Image (cartoon, rainbow, N blue to C red):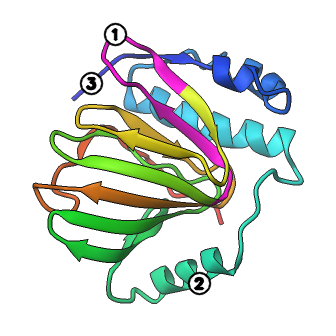
């Protein structure tokens, strides 16, 4: 599946901490291929690191514990190229899990046919790309603890871990966990750790 996405960086520009980085990131103005998607995500991580060498977000022992669970491949763990998911509740169609995103990792630009998901940032920092309808550009927003997002079926979205990032997801997934993923563009490389 191929798709064409313009990007809206205005919410980043409004934050004085992020305005300069947003201006540079805006040079990556369109996502229209797997290559441009990966280029955008890598540029976001590179620019974030250059502008915030001391980091904006913080992680706690919870992040380290979940990374350890993923590395040990404990039950309820789904290792991924970007880190992994740790499932805390699976009572179909209800699913709850932590998305453990390593610095430099990013999820696919995706949408769902039936899945309805609620995300809450727990720790760290990153970016989220999303749009509510096909006639809108992808909005780029900063992620920090406490930020919440709701994605109804059909809404495109992607999470980028510009720093280590922990996101809690509650979802209703009628097709079954991870059976309703429609990947528009996928990551090509794992983060450098």
Which residue is located at x 76 percent, y 55 percent? 57
Residue 32 image point, x, y percent: 39, 20
Q: Is mark 1 on a helix, strand or loop?
A: loop
- Residue stretch rendered in magenta on the structure: 123-139
In what quadrant of the picture does the N terminus appear? top left
Residue 103 position by quadrant: bottom right
Q: How far apart are marks 1 and 2 (CA)?
A: 41 Å
Q: How far apart are marks 2 and 3 (CA)?
A: 37 Å
Q: Which of marks 3 and 1 is nearer the N terminus?
A: 3
Q: What element carries label 2?
A: helix
Q: Which residue lies furthest to the left in this view?
A: 175
| Residue for badge 2 | 65
Q: Earlier in the sequence, mark 1 or mark 2?
A: 2
Asked if the magenta segment contains residue 124, the reply would be yes
- The circle drawn on residue 152 is none
Q: Which residue lies furthest to the top in this view?
A: 135
Can you say whether 73 is above or below 39 in the image?
below
| Residue for badge 3 | 2
Can you say whether 68 is above or below 191 in the image?
below
The residue carrying pointer 1 sits among few (fewer than 14), some (14 to 19) or many (20 or more) residues within 10 Å by Cα, namely few
| Residue for badge 1 | 135
Asked if the magenta segment contains residue 13, the reply would be no
Residue 11 image point, x, y percent: 65, 23
26 vs 170, nearest the viewer: 170
């Amino acid at each position: 599946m191929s798709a064409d996405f313009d990007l809206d960086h205005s919410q980043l520009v409004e934050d004085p901490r992020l305005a300069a980085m947003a201006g540079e990131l805006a040079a990556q103005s369109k996502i229209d291929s797997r290559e441009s998607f990966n280029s955008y995500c890598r540029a976001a991580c590179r620019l974030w690191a250059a502008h915030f060498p001391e980091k904006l977000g913080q992680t706690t022992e919870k992040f380290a514990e979940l990374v350890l669970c993923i590395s040990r491949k404990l039950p309820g763990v789904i290792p991924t190229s970007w880190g992994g998911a740790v499932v805390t509740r699976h009572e179909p169609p209800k699913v709850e899990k932590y998305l453990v995103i390593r610095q430099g990792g990013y999820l696919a630009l995706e949408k769902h046919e039936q899945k309805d998901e609620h995300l809450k940032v727990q720790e760290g920092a990153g970016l989220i790309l999303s749009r509510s309808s096909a006639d809108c550009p992808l909005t780029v927003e900063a992620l920090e603890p406490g930020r919440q997002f709701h994605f109804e079926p059909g809404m495109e979205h992607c999470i980028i871990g510009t720093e280590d990032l922990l996101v809690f997801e509650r979802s209703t997934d009628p097709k079954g966990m991870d059976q309703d993923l429609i990947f528009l563009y996928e990551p090509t490389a794992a983060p450098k750790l």
